[in-house]
Amino acid sequence: MPEQEVLLRVEHLCQYFKTNKAVDDVSFDIKKGEVFGLVGESGCGKTTTGRSIIKLYDITSGNIFFKGKRIAAGTLSYKKAIAKARAEMKTADPVRKAELKSFIADQRVRMKAAIHDHKNCDKLYANLVAEEVDKKFQPLLAAAKGDELQKLKEQYAYEKRIARKQRFMTQIQMIFQDPIASLDPRMTVYETIAEGLVIRGEKDKQVIDEKVYSVLEMVGLVREHAGRYPHEFSGGQRQRIGVARAVVMNPELIIADEPVSALDVSIQAQVINLLNELRHRLGLTIMFVAHDLSVVKYFSDRIGVMYFGKLVELATSDELFAHPLHPYTKSLLSAIPLPDPMYEKKRQRIKYDPLSVHDYSKEQPTLREVSPGHFVQCNQAEFEAYQKELGL
Ligand SMILES: Nc1ncnc2c1ncn2[C@@H]1O[C@H](COP(=O)(O)OP(=O)(O)OP(=O)(O)O)[C@@H](O)[C@H]1O
Ligand SMILES: [Mg+2]
């Protein structure tokens, strides 16, 4: 099977809030077209990961790449490396000193590049799109005359204006956790959905109408809903409005942050089915955040499990359910009830107590590939035990 294209790459992401390491050295890839589930209990850093990806924060450290372009980068790792080298310099011999000096210079260059990319990813993209418009229109303008030329000039100005307002980041859209808090109560459904298009520079009322009405229908609402306000809708419908607002921007990646947790179980399935349908229809890639493994099981191709800011296990959905390795994952799985009375009688909830199951006094854990595509946060001793558990 050919390697699937990596759409999003998260590399050593850290997002600290003062001393709270909300996300701490998290790495994963999301491949084009897949659904990537991110699970873990409340407060483990799922939303913070999502918000870091859409650049709501200046991340503390690490890199985030989208379609191969760096969209976010932090500086702490460079600063730490420089400080460490400086400290070593004090006692180093001249040869080592020279090495350290060039190392520090190199780290500075890298840090500058990181800051540059973090700040400019949108602007660089807008310039690129504007250049494409120039390329398209220049030969046409050169060949046209009279009325036709005038019309072409207008079209050129219009497309150029839109191009300059393009933002690379609009290709990633987030559906927020709380459908009530994330919708402005004073805006109609129409205004809510159209907002992103207007910000992007769209002024043509007909184009906006067409897009808004077509996504309304796509998410299972109707034209008549457009003039109403969020409070007039049920929870499930509000989440559909949230989906419409994301989809109208024609994104490639949607981050759905616990889009169904606030809903009744019967409505949860409807919203998940909707996302699944849209995924196929629009070729979307989805990062689906949930705190409950049972919600992501059938929907996700791969699943990452987070615990206290760390990614503790990452595998395909099938593999994770068949061969969970990390004790935290096992404990999450043991919490899922199944509609099987025999199983339910025997089911025992496994509690996860990190201090009693891990001995990290000699060696700290890192994320390691225990079998192809199956990663677990572990040290060498645990790594060997996990391989044995898999019969490797
Ligand atoms: N803006 C912020 N300022 C300070 N601390 C924050 C901020 N946002 C999140 N945190 C803290 O970071 C940690 C991770 O929070 P986050 O919202 O990412 O968790 P979560 O996994 O999404 O939880 P939930 O399932 O409850 O939504 C928590 O300890 C939280 O208190
Ligand atoms: Mg959250």
Image (tube, rainbow, N blue to C red):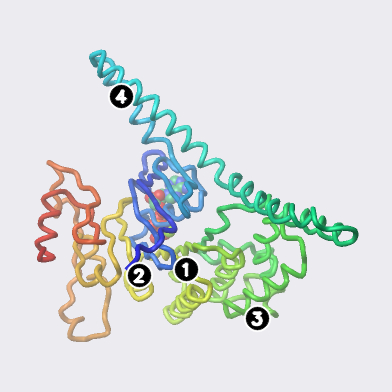
| Along the line of sight, the residue nearer the viewer: 145 or 358 | 145
Report how far apart the C-alphas of labels 2 and 3 lie in the structure. 31 Å
Of labels 4 and 1, earlier in sequence is 4
- The crowding category of the residue bearing disc 2, from other C-alpha atoms within 10 Å (few below 14, some 14 to 19, many at least 20), is some
| Along the line of sight, the residue nearer the viewer: 75 or 8 | 8
Residue at the spot 55% in from the left edge and 45% down from the top edge: 121
Q: Say which of marks 4 and 1 sits in front.
A: 4
Of labels 1 and 2, earlier in sequence is 1
Q: Amino acid at mark 4?
A: Ala
Q: Do tag 3 and tag 4 residues touch (Cβ < 8 Å)? A: no
Q: Secondary structure at mark 2?
A: loop
Q: Amino acid at mark 3?
A: Val
Where does label 3 land, which residue?
222
Report how far apart the C-alphas of labels 2 and 4 lie in the structure. 42 Å
Where does label 2 land, which residue?
301
Does the beta carbon at disc 2 come under 8 Å from ligand 1?
no
Of labels 2 and 4, earlier in sequence is 4
Residue at the spot 65% in from the left edge and 60% down from the top edge: 196
Report how far apart the C-alphas of labels 1 and 2 lie in the structure. 18 Å
**In terms of image quarters, where does ligand 2 lie?**
bottom left
Report how far apart the C-alphas of labels 3 and 4 lie in the structure. 62 Å
Of labels 3 and 4, earlier in sequence is 4
Q: Secondary structure at mark 3?
A: loop
Where does label 1 land, which residue?
259
- The crowding category of the residue bearing disc 1, from other C-alpha atoms within 10 Å (few below 14, some 14 to 19, many at least 20), is many
Residue 151: image location, x then y, percent = 84, 60
Q: Amino acid at mark 1?
A: Pro
Residue at the spot 26% in from the left edge and 66% down from the top edge: 332
Residue at the spot 43% in from the left edge and 56% down from the top edge: 8
